[in-house]
Amino acid sequence: MKQQQPKPDDRSDNVEKLQDMVQNTIENIEESHETMQLATEEERARIEAKNQRREESIEAMRNEIRDEASDRENGYK
């Protein structure tokens, strides 16, 4: 039985992928603001909690973008 080799670590487009993820998350937050206008108090609280988690995710992704960009500049050593 032939063992599969792991794919090589290709980090060349990580920055772009992370930037897309940040943009999509921001768009989700913006869309949720529209939804909140018609939401009940309970739904609004859930949306606000989810948006807080989204904001935390955005900050983590931005930190990772900085790390990846730095690694890219340094040749992924």
Image (tube, rainbow, N blue to C red):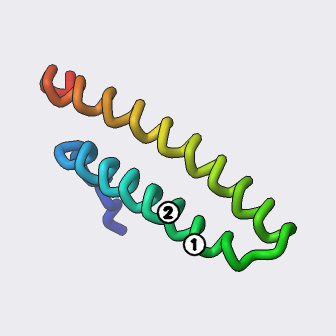
Q: Where is residue 74 in the image (x, y as percent from the top left)?
A: 15, 20
**Front-most of residues 28 and 15:** 28
Residue at which label 1 appears: 34
Residue at which label 2 appears: 30
Residue 9 in view: no
Residue 13 in view: yes
> Residue visible at 53% across and 60% down?
29
**Gap in angstroms between the C-alphas marked 2 and 1:** 7 Å
Q: Is residue 2 left or right of residue 31?
A: left
> Residue visible at 33% across and 27% down?
67
**Front-most of residues 23 and 1:** 23
Is disc 2 surrounded by few (<14), some (14 to 19) or many (20+) residues within 10 Å?
few
Seen in the picture, residue 17 relative to 77 is either above or below; the reply is: below
**Front-most of residues 4 and 39:** 39
Q: In this view, does 6 lie to the left or right of 49?
A: left
Looking at the image, do the residues carrying marks 2 and 1 touch, with CB atoms under 8 Å apart?
Answer: yes
Seen in the picture, residue 35 relative to 59 is either above or below; the reply is: below
> Residue visible at 85% across and 68% down?
41
Q: Position of residue 40 (x, y in %)?
A: 82, 75
Q: Which mark is residue 56?
A: none
Seen in the picture, residue 11 relative to 29 is either above or below; the reply is: above
Location of residue 43 by image quarter: bottom right
Location of residue 21 by image quarter: bottom left
Q: What residue type is labelled 2?
A: Glu
Looking at the rendered structure, the secondary structure element under dot 2 is helix
Q: Position of residue 58 (x, y in %)?
A: 48, 44
Looking at the rendered structure, the secondary structure element under dot 1 is helix
Q: Which amino acid does label 1 sit on?
A: Glu
